[in-house]
Amino acid sequence: MSTHRIALSSAALALAGFVVAGDVAAQSAADTVAARQSQFKLLAFNIGPLVGMAQGNMPYDAAMAQAAADNLVAVASLNQARLWPEGTDSMAMDGTRALPAIWDDLEDFTTKFEALRTGVAEMQTAAGQDLDALRGALGGVGGACTACHDAYRQPQ
Amino acid sequence: MSTHRIALSSAALALAGFVVAGDVAAQSAADTVAARQSQFKLLAFNIGPLVGMAQGNMPYDAAMAQAAADNLVAVASLNQARLWPEGTDSMAMDGTRALPAIWDDLEDFTTKFEALRTGVAEMQTAAGQDLDALRGALGGVGGACTACHDAYRQPQ
């Protein structure tokens, strides 16, 4: 019975394309970099409307602001354990701006990532209240981004 | 005071690169497609170790399995409201396999997305227990992937 369920699962996963893409043993450094960049893309995409509202480039929309803030919290909550293996820095491979300095001080890197989590949690509380509250929380998010990028992201 | 805080936020965001990338008015259809593809990349990346363990290609690791399942729940929880605007289907633009059929029946599409949320919630309960529990929950996740891909994703 248990074997039967596995067989079904494998078939379903094959259909879903996960037998090719899904086996962690087959996940390359490029896959790992793509996954970690995906989370930053999702952060940027959801910071977008919050910045747009704060700067007056679009009308304040409480529901959209709250949804964006909730998304930021969800993305920032992702467990980072598999996303930063050694050998995936900007000196070791193409396609990443992650500086080797990250691995020289993982404790500080982790602290800066935690600051992002704090910033987006404050945004989650503020974003749906009103525009002033949203604006007040934006500095914390932006500051967390900046602090980590300044230290650990290769300039373009 | 409020204005001062806004100015600080804008400066911080400029440093973080979000003034370029962050304004939703400046977010193109390509940005939107990249963001929605990012979430699927993160889903695949986290399904990876669960499939690897289920198929015996890597040892069962309760902590890694739980982290992967938690990540799946976080990614699947993302609010989808801004990710599927009309005009971002595979007939309307390059770089996406999202079939126009999505927009012909958004209610069914939403139902299939909810099935993913149900599947990963069951995986979250199961993954850290033991390998049999993980295997038992994999069919639900894979089935949700397959159902939606079969209906709404252009074959490669």
Image (spheres, coloured by chain):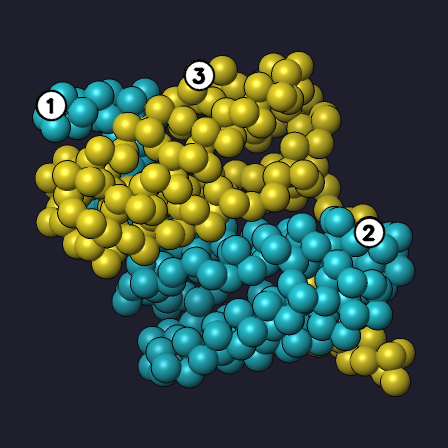
Chain colours: A cyan, B yellow
Local secondary structure at mark 1? loop
Q: Position of residue B81 (x, y in %)?
A: 67, 39
- Viewer-side residue, B24 vs B145: B145
Numbered-mark total: 3
Q: Which mark is residue A27?
A: none
Identify which amino acid the numbered label 1 is placed on. Answer: Met
**Which quadrant is the N terminus of chain A positioned in?**
top left
Local secondary structure at mark 3? helix
Q: Is residue A139 left or right of residue A62?
A: left
Residue to which mark 2 is pinned: A61
Q: In terms of sequence position, does the residue under pointer 2 or pointer 1 come before the other?
A: 1
**Which quadrant is the C terminus of chain A positioned in?**
bottom right
Identify which amino acid the numbered label 3 is placed on. Answer: Asp
Question: Mark 1 near mark 3, Cβ–Cβ under 8 Å?
Answer: no
Q: Is residue A26 visible?
A: no
Residue to which mark 1 is pinned: A1
Q: Nearer the viewer, mark 3 or mark 2?
A: 2
Mark 3: give few (<14), some (14-19) or many (20+) Cα within 10 Å: few
- Viewer-side residue, A22 vs A91: A22
Compute the Cα span from label 3 to label 2.
Answer: 35 Å
